[in-house]
Image (cartoon, helix red, strand yellow):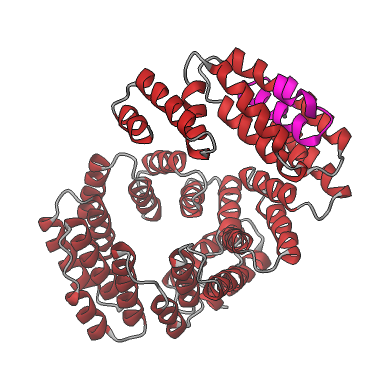
């Protein structure tokens, strides 16, 4: 009978399947698998009433401590029914004997929310909280029934005052804060969760991401390190540490510890071809940053990807290594050849455009960037790069501003595009607007280039102590920064 049911199901013969499952249950009435098949079939059929007796028996025989789970399973199964009205009526009859329990009220609330009846969902959730004011699932359901995130946040915050150890509610509150981009407040919530349960990898990863978002590299490194360590102590946890390891490598590089950066890459698990390939590119870049240009180029030459996109990545990585090593001419020639080999690759064209500008070939730079825009109209980097280049050269400023406005519309939270907007406003004489854009950019990313630009605007606005402070910060982060040198030389200043 079981085999007949499986064959009928595979053939999508609903009536034959239902008949075969009924026969299976008759031959083996104790089979839980047969009962599950049967419930799934009748709920999707016109015979939904046949499921009620089975559900009632399950609820009556369930121990009190697991009855809530059974109620939830019943609600989930009935939510799939075609006859929603009959399913809701059946659920109410089944839950009626347990209406004075938190679980019963929550199940009715969730069923109401499933049919988009927020008012009834909220009423049932409040009834559950009256039965048990500390019920986390009841509070989460009530928050789900709220009309807005603000209302949900207020409910969760009030609940947490009297229930500070409610992990599920605090985690939900933290997620709402993240969605609202209140990253500092969200991090405080996750830090409380971390204090309550120090080895929770979900919490540690969230803290690492939020610390990165808040420009706290030391905090990000601390939390991601703990995340990797906890995963290492729990081999049964199958979560992939690769992303955290790559971030840790980047953070180590940014603070100048190239050995640690390579060490994090060495911990990457084998298996995922894309991750391994990306790690090899990063290793080559780190070798180049450490001054071993021949070793970096040998490593890249050893990579033989068959995919054209990956081949282009190898060429781009080699060009970047050459450029960073001060060999911009070789980098330009390499990218010029690469764009002839892969003429429709917008990433290569973009890198080539930047190298052309560095070589003083501004017309070639503009041609390449406009080709990027044609190939990839949503590539905000191309619009930003051309707009910034025009602003930096103090030419066609209206066009420059229009390009940057378009880039900012595509990526409104990108601090480098905000920097470009601030710079073009400065070039156009709009110092107040320039300062506003640059302050916002620097608040999101404390990059030396942004600091230099903001410093110049502040200097011209008479805020000279603030300007010098920013330039000193930029010099501390990047003592060889060309933008800082040229700015100070142009203003005839020294620090």
Based on the displayed image, in which of its 4 quarters is residue 269 positioned? bottom left
Give the percent coordinates (x, y) of residue 255: 51, 78
Give the percent coordinates (x, y) of residue 52: 62, 22
- Residue at horizontal 82 percent and vertical 48 percent from the top: 160
Q: Is residue 96 above or below residue 284?
A: above
- Residue at horizontal 39 percent and vertical 26 percent from the top: 20
Based on the displayed image, in which of its 4 quarters is residue 77 positioned? top right
Give the percent coordinates (x, y) of residue 145: 71, 29
74 or 232, which is in the foreground? 74
Give the percent coordinates (x, y) of residue 312: 20, 60
Residue 78 in the figure: left or right of residue 136 = left
- Residue at horizontal 48 percent and vertical 74 percent from the top: 254
Quadrant placement of the N terminus: top left
Q: Residue furthest front?
A: 27
Q: What are the residue bounds of the magenta stretch?
A: 93-121
Please indicate, yes or no, whether residue 118 appears anywhere in the rendered image. no
């Amino acid at each position: 009978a079981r085999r007949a049911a499986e064959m009928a199901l595979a053939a999508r013969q609903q009536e034959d399947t239902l008949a075969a499952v009924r026969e299976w249950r008759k031959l083996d009435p104790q089979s839980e698998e047969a009962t599950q098949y049967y419930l799934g079939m009748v709920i999707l059929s016109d015979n939904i009433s046949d499921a009620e007796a089975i559900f009632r028996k399950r609820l009556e025989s369930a121990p009190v401590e697991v009855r809530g789970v059974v109620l939830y399973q019943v609600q989930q199964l009935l939510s799939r029914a075609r006859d929603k009205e009959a399913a809701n009526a059946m659920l109410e009859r089944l839950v009626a004997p347990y209406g004075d329990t938190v679980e019963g009220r929550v199940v009715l609330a969730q069923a109401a929310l499933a049919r988009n009846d927020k008012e009834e969902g909220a009423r049932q959730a409040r009834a559950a909280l009256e039965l048990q004011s500390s019920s986390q699932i009841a509070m989460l359901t009530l928050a789900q029934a709220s009309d807005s995130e603000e209302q949900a946040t207020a409910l969760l915050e009030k609940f947490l005052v009297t229930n500070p150890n409610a992990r599920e509610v605090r985690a939900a509150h933290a997620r709402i804060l993240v969605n609202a981009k209140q990253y500092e407040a969200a991090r405080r919530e996750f830090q409380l969760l971390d204090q309550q349960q120090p080895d929770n990898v979900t919490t540690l990863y969230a803290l690492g991401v939020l610390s990165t978002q808040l420009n706290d590299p030391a905090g990000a490194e601390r939390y991601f390190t703990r995340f990797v360590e906890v995963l290492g102590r729990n081999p049964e946890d199958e979560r992939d540490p690769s992303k955290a390891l790559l971030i840790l490598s980047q953070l180590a590089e940014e603070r100048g510890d190239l050995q640690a950066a390579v060490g994090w890459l060495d911990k990457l698990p084998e298996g995922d071809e894309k991750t391994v390939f990306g790690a090899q590119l990063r290793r080559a870049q780190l070798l180049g940053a450490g001054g071993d240009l021949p070793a970096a180029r040998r490593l890249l030459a050893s990579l033989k990807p068959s995919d054209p996109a990956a081949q282009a990545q190898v060429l781009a990585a080699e060009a970047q290594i050459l450029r960073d090593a001060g060999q911009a001419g070789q980098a330009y020639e390499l990218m010029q050849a690469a764009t002839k080999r892969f003429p429709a690759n917008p990433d290569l064209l973009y890198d080539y455009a930047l190298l052309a500008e560095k070589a003083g070939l501004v017309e070639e730079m503009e041609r390449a960037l406009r080709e990027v825009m044609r190939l990839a109209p949503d590539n905000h980097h191309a619009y930003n790069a051309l707009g910034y280049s025009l602003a930096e050269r103090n030419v066609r400023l209206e066009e420059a501003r229009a390009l940057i406005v378009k880039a900012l519309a595509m990526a409104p939270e990108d601090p480098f595009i905000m920097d470009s907007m601030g710079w073009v406003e400065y070039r156009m004489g709009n110092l107040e607007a320039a300062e506003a854009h640059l302050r916002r950019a620097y608040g999101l990313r404390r990059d030396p280039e942004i600091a230099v630009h903001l410093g110049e605007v502040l200097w011209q606005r008479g805020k000279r102590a603030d300007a010098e402070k920013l330039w000193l910060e930029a010099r501390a982060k990047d003592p060889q920064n060309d933008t800082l040198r040229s700015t100070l030389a142009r203003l005839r200043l020294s620090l």
